[in-house]
Image (cartoon, helix red, strand yellow):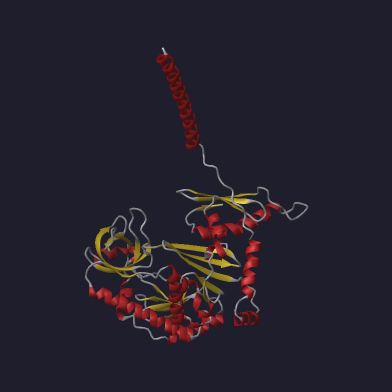
Amino acid sequence: MNDESTTEPTETKNAKNVTATSKDDAVNDELYTEELTSAPKEEKSERIDTGALKDDAAKREKKQPLIQRIVKAIKAEKKSYTELIINSEPLEKRVALLQDGVLEKFEVERTGEAREVGAIFKGHIQNLEPGLKAAFVDIGEDKNAFLHYWDILPAAKDNSVEIVRDNKSEKQRKREAEKISVKDIPKLYPIGSEIVLQITKGQIGTKGPRTTTNIALPGRFLVLMPYTGTLGISRKIEDKKERSRLKGILRGLTLPEGMGIIVRTAGEGKKARYFIRDLHILLKRWEVINQRMDSTKKPTCLYVEPDIVGRTVRDFLTEEIDRVMVDKVEDYKNIIEDVTKISPRSKSKIHLFKDDIPVFERFNIERQIEQTYNRCVPLPGGGEIVIEETEALISIDVNTGSHKNKNKDGKDFILQVNLESATEICRQVRLRNIGGLIIL
């Protein structure tokens, strides 16, 4: 009897526990179902105080070397204090461009990431597609390169460049006189033909990279065009006296027949010796490419663009940059070496960051990057812009929200919101590297 009385309560207790567990499971299932079916809660980001960022930048500007401050005072320049911040991590390298402490440009490159755009390859034409008016070229990579017939023809006259001097070879003049069109491409470049090309757009998904035969090797002040045979100046240099001076320098440069060069905007105000030095570096680089081209008959890579640090020094370290901060000793030494070759005077702008705090935290860049990935971006006056990215287009909506109007009478309220949003939209398009169809 004692055994029966002892067993009965235990069975009842177990049954209760099973029932309680089943109820808990049912509640948990409901919670999980609700989480899966409900839209995620969107976190509203707080507007970063640009005033505080500018104040910090102004303090850093006052610490500039005395010579730089004197030069600025003499020129009576009222420009933004511009800094390049370079951060190197084991898995990636990041570069940020700050103007008065506000993030204006941001780039990242993962370790081991293929630097496709700008790379030069020797390849063999594997297939011609008349319907697409394109050739598919074996360049020794997993995917064949896409080469449109228009990109095989010599580049058409570029309106953004003013031609100063003709340096075409006899062969180039004959081809120009023949007036080759798209219809002639299959005869001139049959399947199996060797061809040298440069990647203009990287591989996306199953599509191979897009390429061109109009090779361009960018330097600090010049762009070498080995197959164009013309020398020109970028029309972005608007000053007439400066253009006239640069034309004189171009006419005096010695260049192998058949090659061409373009003066970049970074060359504005530079003396002739800078162009001679830059041209010498570019010609040496092309000579190495030619040697690799002649040494093999197989499709192969002939040249790859420098990493993000090297490209930054080449493309962004202009007179407009006041300071470059680098947090890795190896990168610092490489930058000093590169700058010594192309612009020794800029060495004083390069600094090694030695603080214990991460360099992007020190300059409040991390917080600004976070906003780049948010759907809603707050405006200074209290409104916001909402950025929606879809496969077909990108829409940007402006919400007035709780905008604080400075005028007591409330006039020009919409105008103020639109002016704020216009400035921020331009910044966000740059930071997010947005392209294609954008609807505001």
- Count of labels shown? 0
Vertical order, 361 against 215 (above or below): above
Q: Residue 399 placed where, x, y %?
A: 62, 48
Residue shown at 46%/31% (left/top)?
A: 29
Is residue 112 visible in this depiction of the protein? yes
- Residue occupying the far top of the picture: 1
Q: Quadrant of the N terminus?
A: top left
Image side of residue 421 versus residue 15, left or right: right
Question: Relative to residue 255, is residue 416 drawn left or right?
Answer: right
Residue closest to the eye, 389 or 24:
24
Residue lying at 52% horizontally and 75% vertically, measured from the top left: 351
Of residues 387 and 18, which is closer to you in this image?
18
Q: Is residue 346 visible?
A: no
Q: Residue extending furthest right?
A: 409
Q: Residue at x 28, y 59 (%)?
A: 144
Which x, y percent locates residue 298?
Answer: 22, 68
Residue 109: percent from the left, percent from the top?
43, 63
The picture places residue 321, in percent across and down from the top left corner, at 55, 73
Residue in the picture at 44% in, 24% down: 18
352 shown above or below 53: below
Left/right placement of residue 4 relative to residue 55 reads: left
